[in-house]
Image (cartoon, rainbow, N blue to C red):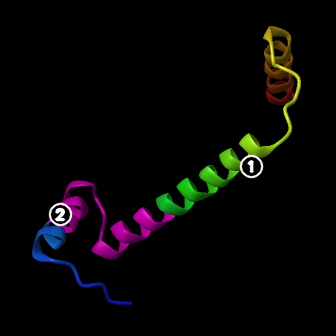
Amino acid sequence: MNISLPDTLKSFVDEQVVGRGYGTSSEYVRELIRNDQDRQRLRGLLLEGAASAPTAPVDRTYFDGLRERVRSRKAG
């Protein structure tokens, strides 16, 4: 796949490659695509959650129990 960019965008990409430690412009573009995929997945999950039926409100007891489960997994 080849992508044509105007000079201003090509310069920006080149600066990102050098300044952020990418080996090539392709690596930079691949990371942008992966980040976009992650954002889209997160958006889908958020919309799915927003459309789901309400559950019981969470309170201090819920979070205390959650912390305890995490601690027990770390210890085990």
Residue in the picture at 17% in, 73% down: 10
Residue in the picture at 81% in, 13% down: 64
The range drawn in magenta is: 12-34
Quarter of the rendering occupied by the N terminus: bottom left
Q: Nearer the viewer, residue 68 or 29?
A: 29
Residue ID for mark 2: 12
Q: Main secondary structure of the magenta part?
A: helix
Q: Secondary structure at mark 2?
A: helix
Q: Residue furthest bottom?
A: 1
- Say if mark 1 contacts mark 2, CB within 8 Å: no
Horizontal and vertical percent position of residue 27: 37, 70
The amino acid type found where label 2 is placed reads Phe
Per the image, is 21 magenta? yes
Left or right for 55, reference 24:
right
Examine the rendered structure and indicate whether residue 44 appears above or below residue 74: below
Per the image, is 67 magenta? no
Between disc 1 and disc 2, whose residue precedes?
2
Examine the rendered structure and indicate whether residue 61 appears above or below residue 50: above
Left or right for 57, reference 34:
right
Q: Classify 10 Å Cα crowding around label 2: few (below 14), some (14-19), many (20 and above).
A: few
Residue ID for mark 1: 48
